């Protein structure tokens, strides 16, 4: 079985790689910078230097693949939706031209809206392009990554504040990227599924931002409170960080779409629920940084 993995150094991709290696598979890893891969991984995998933005290179690197794990990497494009869609078009081309039987795509909750969800719209367009190939495709619609909190370490350390433009009382799925990797690897290794499907990856519980702050307070050993900020306050911060106008709106839109009471198309079931709690993740990964 030849399984191709993109973004093998990412939080999800690296977990997928580790599990494939442990299963006895020698995966093919597409890496823009192979030197970032640990030596122990490079020794046990086929590593191909490949920029996912180069369609010709992606087609060559995936020739002969039985299964593909595809992640639309950040592109730095002024329009992030178009950037993600451009990457998705390369994935669809490779699936079509190489006859790749099964693809697992790292999507997101909100992709089902197809428009109005900021950057996530680009993932929705990738879903559509992969489906149009007629191949067997699974879209993993994931919740809010716990690891996004690592971008807030300085604010949590100095102010004890978790800022968001989302309603503080709106519950949503929160998930550990390692658990997403577990689901992706299991699907890549299973040849028994066919068709085109979506599967939520929701973590163990839907949490409001207020509930998340309370969990963090207990786990990291210091007070944390959730604070609502306006879209304009977020825009100002993003502009100050150097983001362009469409990049700013791409980020703002990722939370604005939830305000109409949106609920994921993939409801919480045994298949969409993963085990790692926010509290255990925060104790292990966030607490040492604070």
Image (tube, rainbow, N blue to C red):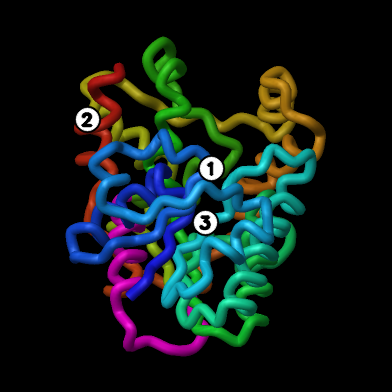
Q: Is residue 207 visible?
A: no
Q: Which residue is mark 3?
A: 71
Start-end of magenta stretch: 178-198
Residue at (26, 31) in percent of width and height: 285
Q: Secondary structure at mark 1?
A: loop
* Residue 19: quarter of image: bottom left
Q: Which of pointers 2 and 1 lies earlier in the amino acid sequence? A: 1
Find out whether the residues at labels 2 and 3 contact each other: C-beta distance under 8 Å: no
| Mark-to-mark CA distance, 3 and 1 | 13 Å
* Residue 57: quarter of image: bottom right
Q: Horizontal and vertical percent for residue 58?
A: 60, 60
| Nearest-to-viewer mark from 2 and 1 | 1
Q: Horizontal and vertical percent for residue 5?
A: 43, 59
Pick the front one: 142 or 231: 142
Q: Which residue is mark 2?
A: 218
Q: Horizontal and vertical percent for residue 50?
A: 56, 49
Q: Which of pointers 2 and 3 lies earlier in the amino acid sequence? A: 3
Around disc 2, counting alpha carbons within 10 Å, would you say few (fewer than 14), some (14 to 19), or many (20 or more)? some
Find out whether the residues at labels 3 and 1 contact each other: C-beta distance under 8 Å: no
Around disc 3, counting alpha carbons within 10 Å, would you say few (fewer than 14), some (14 to 19), or many (20 or more)? many
Query: Which quadrant would the C terminus be assigned to in this image?
Result: top left
Q: Is residue 68 magenta?
A: no
């Amino acid at each position: 079985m030849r399984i191709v993995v993109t973004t093998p150094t990412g939080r999800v991709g690296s977990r997928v790689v580790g599990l494939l290696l442990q299963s006895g598979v020698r995966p093919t890893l597409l890496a823009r910078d192979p030197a970032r891969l640990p030596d122990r991984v490079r020794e046990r995998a086929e590593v191909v230097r490949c920029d996912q933005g180069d369609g010709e290179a992606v087609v060559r690197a995936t020739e002969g693949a039985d299964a593909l794990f595809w992640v639309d990497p950040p592109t730095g494009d002024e329009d992030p939706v178009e950037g993600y869609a451009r990457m998705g078009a390369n994935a669809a081309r490779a699936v079509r031209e190489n006859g790749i039987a099964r693809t697992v795509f790292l999507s997101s909750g909100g992709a089902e809206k197809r428009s109005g969800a900021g950057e996530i719209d680009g993932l929705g367009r990738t879903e559509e392009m992969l489906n149009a190939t007629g191949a067997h495709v699974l879209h993993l619609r994931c919740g809010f990554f716990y690891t996004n909190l690592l971008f807030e370490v300085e604010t949590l350390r100095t102010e004890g504040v978790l800022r968001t433009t989302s309603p503080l009382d709106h519950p949503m799925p929160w998930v550990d990227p390692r658990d997403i990797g577990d689901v992706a690897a299991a699907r890549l290794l299973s040849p028994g599924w066919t068709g085109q499907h979506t599967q939520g990856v929701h973590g163990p519980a839907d949490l409001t931002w207020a509930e998340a702050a309370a969990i963090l307070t207990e786990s990291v050993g210091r007070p944390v409170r959730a604070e609502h900020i306006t879209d304009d306050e977020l825009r100002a911060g993003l502009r100050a960080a150097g983001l362009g106008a469409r990049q700013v709106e791409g980020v703002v839109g990722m939370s604005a779409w939830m305000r109409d009471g949106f609920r994921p198309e993939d409801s919480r079931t045994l298949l969409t629920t993963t085990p790692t709690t926010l509290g255990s993740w925060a104790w292990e990964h966030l607490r040492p940084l604070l």
